[in-house]
Amino acid sequence: MTPETDPWLAVRTAARARAQALGLPTTAREDWRYVDVRPLAADPATWAAPAAAVAAADIDRHRLPGVPTLVLVDGKVVEAPSQHDGLAITPLGKLDEPRRSALLARWSAALAVEDDPTACWSIADCAGGVHVAARGEALAPLQVLVIASGGVQGCRVVIEVAPGAALELVITHVELAPARLSIACEVEVGAGGRLHVDEVQASGHALPAAQHLAFAQLTLARDAQVAWTSAAQGGTLVRLRTAAVIAGPGAMLELAGLLQLAGQRQAHVHTRVRHAAGNAASRQLFKTIVDGHAVASFDGLVAVEVGADGTDAQQRNHNLLLAPTARVDSRPQLDILADDVKASHGATVGRPDPEELFYLRSRGLGAEQALAVLNRGFANAVIERMRNPAARALAERILLGTLVG
Amino acid sequence: MLTITDLHVSTNDQPILKGLSLTVRAGEVHAIMGPNGSGKSTLTKTIAGHPAYTITSGSLLFQGSDLTALEPEARAHQGIFIGFQYPVEVPGVNNADFLRLALNAKRKAQGQAELGAKEFAPLLAERMRAVEIDPAFKDRQLNAGLSGGQKKRNEILQMVVLEPLLAILDETDSGLDIDALRVVAAGINAYRRADRAIVLITHYERLLDLVRPDVVHVLAGGRIVTSGGPELAAQIERTGYDDLVKAAGA
């Protein structure tokens, strides 16, 4: 098939052209100011080739207990639960009309104004993608296991939560070999709908060479509730970008994230929360633990539009520096154009409290163990937001397991 | 059990303890009283091994061995416990998890098997009952969000879980209402044993009415200026420290 006959190929080609026109990000651009962008310049041809097939064992060992699994390998659906009440899972290539045309039109429109080449890559390099639609109270959680087997991969996950419907997702990202994954989740939550996402970047420990470029686009209608909690261990380059639009009153958006970085890893959080409707709330809590020569940043903006009165927005970024050689940049920002708004933001960067460490040691904990306990306590406010026990256990094991025996 | 001889301690280059000597034997309960700024908390933190306190001269022995080179955790493993005047808040750390970690650290150091969560739970429940602490406490954060009195009771809970040989309780009675004081005193009395020693640091006689000390010391100007029996505490309650301190020439 050619771009002329295959509309998916056509939009991928357009995305690639857009990415090339934009060029690679540089630190001269505000959005990438704190990021070591050099890994992005790696020639895609030098990446390890993706696997022709992924062994069942490589999939199985990343399944969470007690949760049905939707498996995407290198962007393509390879397994979906045969039946999941209230949920329709469709590979994008099998999307029917008019949803297919609507999605393609949306992508084309977004590409025309997209200024982030990595978001363009999520389309350009996407060989598949999936559409997940919650039509009822789909209370049983679903694991979305995103596996990159190597090479340069893109993935699009379109999530629709119908008015009044509920969906609980656990998204786990696994790189089996050094890979660059650009993934975008497009999320629309209808009036009164609820979405709860626990997300874990699960392979950073084994593979610090991974590049993980994530983009979550969220739209919340009236009374919609979204709670999205991410945990990541960083890599050559990990960037978690979120752009949310609160489009209806009564909506509640909760974004939380935990980064635990050591060695030479880097990870960056970039959030843009736009309150387009009033009488809605947003909460952001991002915490970072950095050690070694790791580099992390938080760049967050809450924008409250004209007329969005009654907005209640909160943005918090707390960072724990374990080594003087590690680096954290924090940039919480507010842009408020409405009159009656409750908005607060704050950031802290600190070292482990010597009095807390001494107290724990006076009770018999060794210096390392005391520090691990403090780190765990620091991380707890984010980890406890994870609703799914298996996701929480995974995040604890991957991010804190090396800290607490 | 604890032998302190002519101890001089400084913090921030300020000498605080200036020749303190104290001997505490197994089975004894000692009370140390003294005006504010006399060095009571410096003494406890020095025994615990706080890095901000430097011993400039003198000796500090526990069961005949020098403590001064030991890390704080090694002192805890040997059986020293300090109930702090201001227990530190450690947000996000679960009380029960912490108690199990602390007990296991000590058991490991002593060559004993560590306790799993299932083995630890009944032990913790029994100790919480013994010191009349609400079972919900185990799921609270370590001191974070607790009232002053609750923190002090939490220190006593830590003591009965960790079972030290020497417990030094620094103003454990302050911030407690009379009912809480009775519970804490009962916990301390139940803890008395021939092989254990307790040092109470306090401003008030009321704790000493409930926990009868064998010896009462007055600490002033960084030294023990006088020692006596329980009647010394009663005298302090009546006349204050000034006369005693003057009479001792401190």
Image (cartoon, helix red, strand yellow):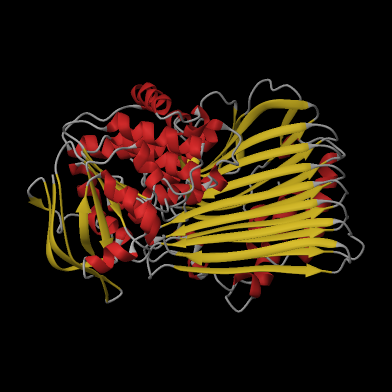
Which quarter of the figure is the C terminus of chain B placed in?
bottom left
Q: Nearer the viewer, residue A290 or B16?
A: B16
> Which percent across, then down, holds residue A103?
80, 46
Residue B89 rendering spot, x and y as whole percentages: 46, 51
Residue A316 horizontal side relative to residue A249, left or right? left
Image height of A359 relative to A87, above or below? below
Q: Is residue A378 left or right of residue B231?
A: right
**Is residue A238 in sight in this rendering?**
yes
The answer to whether any part of residue A268 appears in the image is: no
Please identify the quarter of the rendering in which residue A127 is found.
top right
Asked if residue A154 lies left or right of residue A375, the reply is right
Residue at 69 percent across and 69 percent down: it is: A333
Question: Residue at image x 55%, y 60%?
Answer: A318
Q: Is residue A12 above or below residue B12?
A: above
Which quarter of the picture shows residue A162? top right
Q: Is residue B195 above or below residue B147?
A: above
Q: Residue furthest left?
A: B64
Q: Nearer the viewer, residue B71 or B233?
A: B233
Q: Nearer the viewer, residue B243 or A365?
A: B243
Q: Quadrant of the N terminus of chain B?
A: top left
Count the numbered circles shown. 0
As drawn, which residue projects farthest toward the bottom? A28
Q: Is B55 in front, or is B70?
A: B55
